[in-house]
Every structure is written in structure tokens, then in C-alpha cells.
Image (cartoon, rainbow, N blue to C red):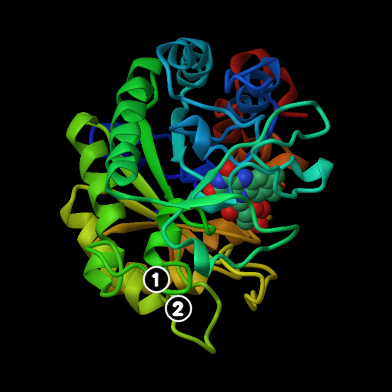
Amino acid sequence: MTDLLSSLPLRDVESPNRIAVSPMCQYSCATDGLPTEWHRVHLGSRAVGGAGIVMTEATAVDPVGRITPHDLGIWSDEHAAALEPTTEFVRDLGGVPGIQLAHAGHKASKTRPWDGNVPIAPDGTDPTGASGWEVLSPSPDAYPPFDGDRPAMRKADQDDIEGVIDAYRAAAERSLEAGFEIAEVHAAHGYLLHEFLSPVTNHREDDYGGSFENRTRLVREVVAAVREVWPDEKPVFVRISGTDWLDDRESWDIEQSVRLADALAELGVDLVDVSSGGLHPEQAVPGGPNFQVPLAEQVRAGADIAVGAVGGITEPEQADALVRNNRADLVLVGREFLRDPYFGLRAAGDLERDPKDAAKQWPVQYRRAAQR
Ligand SMILES: Cc1cc2nc3c(=O)[nH]c(=O)nc-3n(C[C@H](O)[C@H](O)[C@H](O)COP(=O)(O)O)c2cc1C
């Protein structure tokens, strides 16, 4: 019986269990996109805490793709070198380091959440004095602002689109140099790739807008570029929003997500990480425990690909049940990993029948504390 503590084979990479740290922005760089002590401790603690997969926060493939001036980036060799000690640390603990590759599209150039999460104009600054920039959008006229004023934005032309694909490809190459084992393409939460997917934000009339085929073109081209440079032995994930939660209008929904998942499988994607929403302020998100699991389940049932479930998963038994009952192949835990960095060790303690087996999953340095 496969359960939460079973290993997860992904091509030649094996996660020791099916618990992943969900990507979570820390907005803790200076303004250069380079990781700081915060990132090393934050990601390192979750590796110590028994996560099988430690995924970075949304890591910008290009400076204009940062949500805030303080986001993590992977647009130069210097970034790759600076991330290497963290990937090495995660691997030394038996974990699998993953990186979420992101471009924020029209949700870029904002202040950090604790500074209000509002757009910074290209000639404006955030409270730290960091400048804003012009953001990229599939269709600027369709932009639904979540908060604050509309940012200064430009419609992505063919050169911009090629630039985005190239930036993802180069970012994947650098991620490999940095020692990451999983590359996750961020195509969810109303950021650039999701903006192209959804008819709510994509009103284009060229090859990248209109039909399902056209709206999914950019994400497919980005994934193909990443797969081209990412070794066959290593897995690629894609995070999608399973639905826009805008059932009252033409929008991105679960049927299209299933179709996209099938297309991604054909491009060599190994797992679809199914989140939701983030595109439009009028979204009606249900929330609560397991609130996105039915979406993951539908992708798993309808497409020939492994899925990750995320959202409202806080208890080891709850996570275990998702794997045991074939509802998901991997469980991603976000906020609970912030409350309890040792969630993975807690899961081992709660779920292993023999406490000795649970203790074996603790880092040797901490093992004396594993058994009372
Ligand atoms: C502080 C914070 C930062 C987040 N940053 C990201 C991110 O960088 N990329 C992403 O795909 N999701 C991000 N999310 C969403 C989480 O990955 C996760 O999908 C969401 O919190 C639901 O899972 P949970 O209920 O386990 O927290 C963030 C969530 C939080 C709380």
C-alpha cells in the first residue's frame, strides 16, 4: 500500500516520502534576487524537518518577472552559485531540492505584502526605496486589478514572448548548475503563464489567444524549452490553477486543466501540481481543509500524469489519506510548514507503527530527541 511515507520515484530521482514544501515567496532578497541567510535557514529548516521535496519560492526567470523588488531570482550565474549551498544541504539530508521558475506577468512590480501589496509605478519606489518597472501582460485592457491602481503595463509582443521562453530555458540551465533536481514551471495564480491560459486575461487575436490551442501555446512552449535542457533523468513539474473559480463567465476551468495536463504529459512533464485561482478579484474560492483536492483528483482521473494536491492540508493523517486513497501522488504543504517546520518528522512520528522507524527519519544530530 502506498502511503505518505512511501518513497516517490520520479525518473531517476527519488523523494524519500510524498511530502513537499509548497513554494512560498519570502520577499527577503535585497533587490538583486540573490538568496540571503533567510532563504538558507528557511529552506534548510524544512529539509531538517523531514520534507521529501523542498521547493523554493517563485523564483524569477527575469527581473521584470518578479512580484516585488525583493523576490528571489535565477537570471544570472551568480544566482545559481548562490543557491548551490542550499541545494547541497537539502540533498545531504536525503531531501530533493526543487525550484519553482516564475514570471509574474502583470502581477509584477508590487510592494511586499507587509508594505501593502500595491503596484509600484515605473518611476515610483517601495518603502525600501526600490524602484518599480513596466510589467508585461497578454492583454493590458483585460487586466482586473486585485488591489491598488492598474500598474503601467505593456502588451507582450512576439519578441517579448520569445524572450520569456528563452528566459525560462536559461533559468532551467542555471537551476541545474545550482544542483536542483526538480524544475517546476509556475503556470498558476494569475501570473504570466496563467494570464495567457485564461480567456479572462487573454484577449489576444494572434497565435497566443482565442482557442484552447492558442491560449496554451506559451505554457507548452515554455515547458518544451525547459524539457530541452533539463536532463531526461530528472523530473519537471508544472503548477497550474485548476480553475479560476469564475463559473459565471468564460474562464479557465477544470476541463481545460485536464486537457492541458494531458498535453503536458506528452511534453515530458512528470507531475502537475494542482492549485487554483489567483487571477481575478471576483473569484469565489471555497477554502477549508482539502479545498483544492477535488481538482487534483479530477486531473489525476482524466489525464495520464501524477498529481500533487495542495491547500488546507495540515495534519499528517489527512495527508496520508490522500495518498492511500489514490487521490494524489504527492502532498504539498504550505502554511502548516511555516507553523511547524518539522511537519515531516511529525508525520513520521504519527504514522509509523514502530517508533524506531520514525526515529530513523530524523537527522542523526537530532535523533536522541526522537524517542522519549
Ligand atoms: C507566504 C506564502 C507565500 C506563497 N508563495 C507562493 C509561491 O511563491 N508560489 C506558489 O505557487 N504559491 C505560493 N503560495 C501558495 C502556497 O504554495 C500554497 O499553494 C497555499 O498556501 C495553499 O496551501 P496551504 O493551505 O498548505 O498553505 C504562497 C503561500 C503563502 C502562505
Q: Is mark 2 on a helix, strand or loop?
A: loop
The answer to which image quadrant residue 185 occupies is top left
Q: Is residue 362 above or below residue 273?
A: above
The residue identified by callout 2 is 251
Looking at the rendered image, the quarter that the C terminus falls into is top right
Tell me the distance, in whole angstroms, between the alpha carbons under discs 2 and 1.
Answer: 12 Å
Viewer-nearest of discs 2 and 1:
1
Q: Seen in the image, is 43 located left or right of residue 274?
A: right
Considering depth in this image, is 94 or 78 the residue closer to the camera? 78
Mark 1 crowdedness (10 Å alpha carbons): few <14, some 14-19, many ≥20: some
Residue at the spot 43% in from the left edge and 24% down from the top edge: 75
- Picture coordinates of residue 63, whole percent (x, y): 51, 30
The quarter of the picture where residue 229 lies is: top left
Residue 143 position (above or below residue 308)? below
Disc 2: residue Cβ within 8 A of ligand 1's nearest atom: no
Q: Identify residue type, mark 2.
A: Ser
Is any atom of residue 13 visible in this view? yes
Q: In this view, does 254 lie to the left or right of 353?
A: left
Q: Earlier in the sequence, mark 2 or mark 1?
A: 1
Which residue does the image show at 56% across and 66% down from the upper left? 277
The residue pinned by badge 1 equals 203
Q: Badge 2 local density, few (<14 within 10 Å), some, or many (20+)?
A: some
For the point 50% across and 86% down, the residue is 249
Image-quadrant location for residue 264 = bottom left
The N terminus sits in image quarter? bottom left
Position of 312 relative to 91 (above/below): below
